[in-house]
């Protein structure tokens, strides 16, 4: 079997940003987050048409067309996530109700039976509400998260000295990020944010909204721990596309979009750079056999079969991540994955993994 596909890869960095740039990025984040929330209200509550909103939003908020599209696409991503999660929540509740119904039948205590029936009624009511939302295509988003929103009712338990302190945290949370969509047709893969290579580092030139006094800001000396080569290749390909277009030569086969997500946390800003990367061609055939993996708590067991399904090789890879931090765990898993992939490449046999679903193991 020969397969060739593409996938979006994301690389992150934490650039050093001075106070002036930090203030500008924060103001931009607050503005674009406000655009996103207003767009949600107009589209899903006031039922307005997206085509009728674009020009008015550009004028009303003083943003560019690409910044409007970025807010729209970010919002659409949240909507898709909500709908997928809604399906899972409905499925999980249905499973809980089936188990609870069987459990109630086996109860001998009238008191326990009464309490379980009350819980059954509450879950059933919740399920009906979710199904109604799905049927009516009702979207319920809480910008800033429901968890943080509810903390205002229990300030001391959540380490807030006052409601004003909570409100500031709430505002910062719901305005802590903005997204800038790119396109391979645009210079440098993105008109709103251009990445420029400067020796071993990079710089970002960010196009500010029209309402701002400055047109753009530049963040210098950006480095990436991972993905540096892929980003360089993407920059070079976009530059080749630009030159071919100016020379009026075929250029449609070149160019890649670069998307940027800026997110502020307790420490500083993080920048996520997403590019499309072609995956290497896969050359495996199950006619030669398979490589099966069993993932355990402290090791990964490998079993290789021939084309008849007979086991011809076994191996155990130590993979204990207990007590390790995130980077150490990723390094251990990465080393094991590398060895397994090399074996699969040499034998040209596909890797088979078990797919586990723990949803039904939730308590009643």
Image (tube, grey):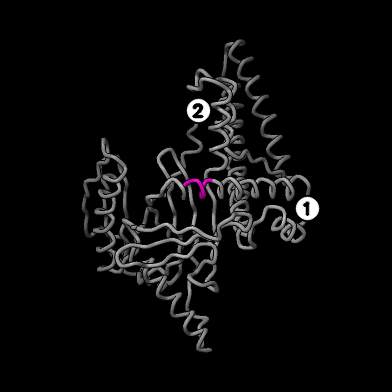
Q: Is residue 65 above or below residue 42?
A: below
Report which quarter residue 162 is drawn in: top right
- Horizontally, residue 119 falls left or right of residue 288, namely right
Q: Residue placed at 50% from the left, 88% from the top?
A: 247
- Horizontally, residue 204 falls left or right of residue 313, namely right
Q: Nearer the viewer, residue 328 or 126?
A: 328
Magenta stretch: includes residue 25: yes
Q: How many marks?
A: 2
Question: Could you tell me residue 29's position as x and y percent?
Answer: 55, 48
Q: Residue placed at 60% from the left, 32% from the top?
A: 98
Q: Which residue is mark 1?
A: 48
Q: Quadrant of the C terminus?
A: top right
Q: Main secondary structure of the magenta part?
A: helix
- Compare marks 1 and 2 and give the one earlier in the sequence: 1
Q: Is residue 176 above or below residue 102?
A: below
Q: Nearer the viewer, residue 3 or 328?
A: 328
Q: Is residue 96 above or below residue 19?
A: above
> In the image, which residues are magenta?
22-26
Q: Residue placed at 31% from the left, 52% from the top?
A: 293
- Horizontally, residue 182 falls left or right of residue 315, namely right
Q: Residue placed at 58% from the left, 11% from the top?
A: 109
Q: Which residue is mark 2?
A: 363
Q: Quadrant of the N terminus?
A: bottom left
Instruction: Label 2, secondary structure: give it.
Output: loop
- Horizontally, residue 132 falls left or right of residue 192, namely right
Q: Which mark is residue 198?
A: none
Question: Could you tell me residue 214's position as x and y percent?
Answer: 55, 57
Q: Is residue 287 above or below residue 329?
A: below
């Amino acid at each position: 079997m020969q397969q060739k596909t593409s996938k979006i890869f994301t690389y992150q960095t934490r650039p050093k940003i001075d106070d002036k740039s930090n203030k500008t990025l924060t103001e931009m984040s607050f503005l674009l987050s406000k655009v996103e929330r207003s767009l949600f209200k107009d589209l899903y509550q006031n039922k307005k048409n997206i085509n009728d909103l674009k020009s008015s939003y550009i004028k009303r908020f003083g943003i560019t067309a690409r910044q409007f599209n970025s807010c729209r696409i970010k919002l659409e991503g949240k909507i898709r996530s909500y709908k997928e999660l809604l399906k899972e929540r409905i499925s999980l509740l249905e499973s809980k109700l089936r188990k609870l119904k069987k459990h109630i039948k086996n109860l001998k205590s009238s008191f326990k039976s009464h309490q379980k029936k009350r819980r059954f009624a509450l879950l059933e009511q919740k399920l009906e509400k979710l199904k109604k939302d799905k049927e009516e295509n009702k979207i319920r988003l809480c910008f800033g998260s429901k968890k943080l929103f509810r903390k205002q009712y229990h300030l001391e338990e959540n380490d807030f000295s006052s409601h004003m302190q909570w409100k500031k945290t709430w505002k910062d949370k719901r305005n802590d990020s903005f997204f800038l969509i790119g396109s391979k047709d645009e210079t440098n893969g993105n008109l709103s944010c251009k990445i420029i290579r400067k020796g071993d580092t990079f710089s970002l030139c960010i196009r500010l909204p029209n309402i701002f006094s400055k047109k753009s800001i530049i963040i210098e000396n950006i480095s990436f721990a991972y993905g540096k080569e892929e980003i360089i290749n993407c920059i070079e390909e976009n530059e080749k596309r630009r030159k071919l277009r100016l020379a009026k030569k075929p250029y449609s086969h070149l160019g890649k979009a670069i998307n940027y997500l800026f997110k502020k946390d307790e420490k500083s800003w993080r920048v996520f750079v997403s590019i499309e990367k072609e995956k290497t061609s896969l050359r495996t055939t199950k006619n030669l056999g398979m490589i099966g993996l069993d993932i355990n708590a402290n090791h990964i067991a490998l079993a290789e079969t021939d084309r008849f399904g007979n086991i011809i090789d076994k191996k155990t890879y130590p993979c204990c991540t207990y007590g390790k931090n995130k980077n150490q765990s990723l390094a251990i898993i990465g080393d094991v994955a590398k060895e397994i992939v090399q074996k699969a490449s040499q034998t040209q046999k596909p890797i088979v993994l078990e797919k586990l679903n723990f949803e039904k193991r939730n308590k009643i």
